Image (tube, helix red, strand yellow):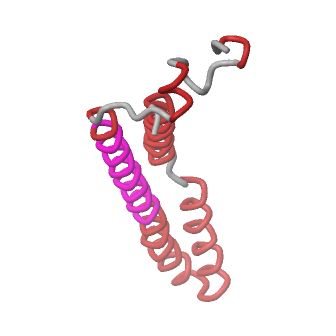
Amino acid sequence: MSRRFLDGEVADAERALASAKEAAERLPWGLAAGVAGGCAVFGYGLGGLAGVVVGPLVGFFLGHGTIDRARSGGRHRIATAEDQLASIREIRRVATALPEIFSLTEELSGVPDDKPAAYRAT
């Protein structure tokens, strides 16, 4: 694998980690508030005054659970992205520590294969 390719893979993994961290910061507060409000309305419709007391209480816990699941998912995505980044960095470290391997045409011409044909000696 070429160093340039591995550097690109590391950059992609770093961007994925940054994206996962940003996504973990954005919690679904609107959804949690909607769940809590829906429980309050449902409680009022179902049980009148007692439902008005119980509905928001249930809604609070359901909304809290929604936020907690989002946080847990965010932590999991961050951990996965960190593991992938560490793995790719290790692959790059090992691959760049090995001596370069040249193709037969590179050995014979002394010019890398990825150069245009006009650059190559004939």
> Foreground: 120 or 78?
120
Please report the residue visible at 41 percent of the width from the left and 49 percent of the height from the top.
81
Quadrant housing the N terminus: top left
Drawn side of residue 1 relative to residue 98, left or right: right
Q: Is residue 87 magenta?
A: yes
Image point 48% across, 66% down: which residue?
66
**Residue 14 falls in which quadrant of the image?**
top left
Q: Is residue 79 above or below residue 62?
A: above
- Residue 30 versus residue 114: which sits nearer the camera? 114
Residue 60 x %, y % = 45, 68
Residue 46, x across and y down, in percent: 64, 88
Residue 43, percent from left and from top:
59, 81
In-image side of 94 versus 34 (left or right)? left
Residue drawn at the location 47% of the way across and 26% of the way down: 107
Predominant SS of the magenta segment: helix
* Range shown magenta: 68-93
Q: Quadrant of the C terminus?
A: top right
Q: Nearer the viewer, residue 28 or 23?
A: 23
Q: Which of these two is toward me, 43 or 62? A: 62
Is residue 78 rendered magenta in the image?
A: yes
Determine the residue positioned at 73% across, 12% down. 118
Compared to 30, does 5 lie above or below? above
Q: Position of residue 83 (x, y in %)?
A: 33, 51
